Amino acid sequence: MKSQAIVNYGAPLEEVESELPKPTGNEVLIEISHCGVCHSDVHFHDGYFDMGGGEKLDVTRARKTPFTLGHEIEGTVVAVGDAVKNVKVGEHKVIYPWIGCGDCPDCHNDREHYCTGRALGVRLPGGFSSHCLVPEEHYCLDADGIEPGLASTYMCSGITAYAALKHLKPMDDNEPVLIMGLGGVGMMALQFALQMLNRPVLVADLDDNKLQAAMGAGAHAAYNPKDPEALAKLQADTNGGVGAAVDFVGAESSLAFTSAALRRGGEAKVVGLFGGAFQMPIPYFPFRAISIGGSMTGSLADTIEMLEIVKAGKINPIPVEMRDMSQASQTLDDLREGKILGRVVLTN
């Protein structure tokens, strides 16, 4: 088995060879055809998350090196354990990666994405590799009818966008929703919002090219926060602000714009992990009656539900660039520098 692995945090990934795993029990061995590259991979590669004010959250102790990143995994079943009943050798699958410990309240109540005790590419070896060992067969999902490569992106980019939008609190009829950030997840969210919400979808980003792409993909209006008049224009266009907004950047400046764009009683969900710290005077919460919370990927049930929508042809694909698996390290660098529109998917 060959993997593009972290040997030293922050240093370029290196090709590592190891013995091919042999599945036992309920395990399934996947020969990987595609693996999407997510911005969270950048943070895990760096070994920390930016907590603002010079503080860093060290995540290096959660795994041993060499370690293989990658959680948007797609491929073919090549071997199964002796207890596997419903997954067959030769089947093409996408893999739900947000696997919990299996023995906590979250795992017992369809919230194992909050546990992530065995998450692929986070705690267990992931998809920047020729093969991946999946702990249980029911995480191997059917993506028939979805274009290969694109299918892999729904295991993080897709489910993260879908779950954040699905679990927004109710809004007034035809009230606009704001999507902040038009990277791979934000562009995916635009497509889901257009299908799910039946309301105008507004977008915001610092990159005018991304704003133009979003308008071409169906956004109702676009705003660049670098424009000092952008917030006032949004508030005027929406008669006081939006009822809900999702921040797919997760930076100090993006959340400041997102929260300010809310009408009284509005809700903001933070999805992005760019980093930093956020401050707001406490009286603003009751005065404006706003709520700010987080959304972390989605449940296995949400993922299965989402895939059915995609397989029905209701979601337009985001831009996907295919690169050879050997370009994993360069792709992480390109993500750091904001050079990627849509999603890069690594191939074997």
Image: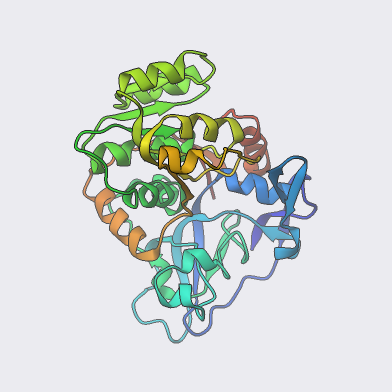
Horizontal arrangement in the rendering, residue 221 relative to residue 253 (left or right): left
x then y, percent, for residue 97: 49, 62
Give the vertical position of 229 relative to 66 (above or below): above
Closer to us: 25 or 293: 293
Horizontal arrangement in the rendering, residue 95 relative to residue 101 (left or right): left
Closer to us: 259 or 68: 259
x then y, percent, for residue 60: 75, 58
Closer to us: 95 or 157: 157
Give the vertical position of 28 relative to 163 (above or below): below
Whether residue 121 appears in this view of the structure is yes
x then y, percent, for residue 333: 67, 36
Give the vertical position of 244 relative to 74 (above or below): above
- Residue that appears at 43% across and 21% down: 211
- Residue that appears at 59% across and 47% down: 40
- Residue that appears at 42% across and 57% down: 298
Whether residue 181 appears in this view of the structure is no
- Residue that appears at 60% across and 73% down: 21
x then y, percent, for residue 280: 57, 38
Which quarter of the figure is the N terminus placed in?
bottom right
Give the vertical position of 81 relative to 226 (above or below): below
Horizontal arrangement in the rendering, residue 117 relative to residue 105 (left or right): right
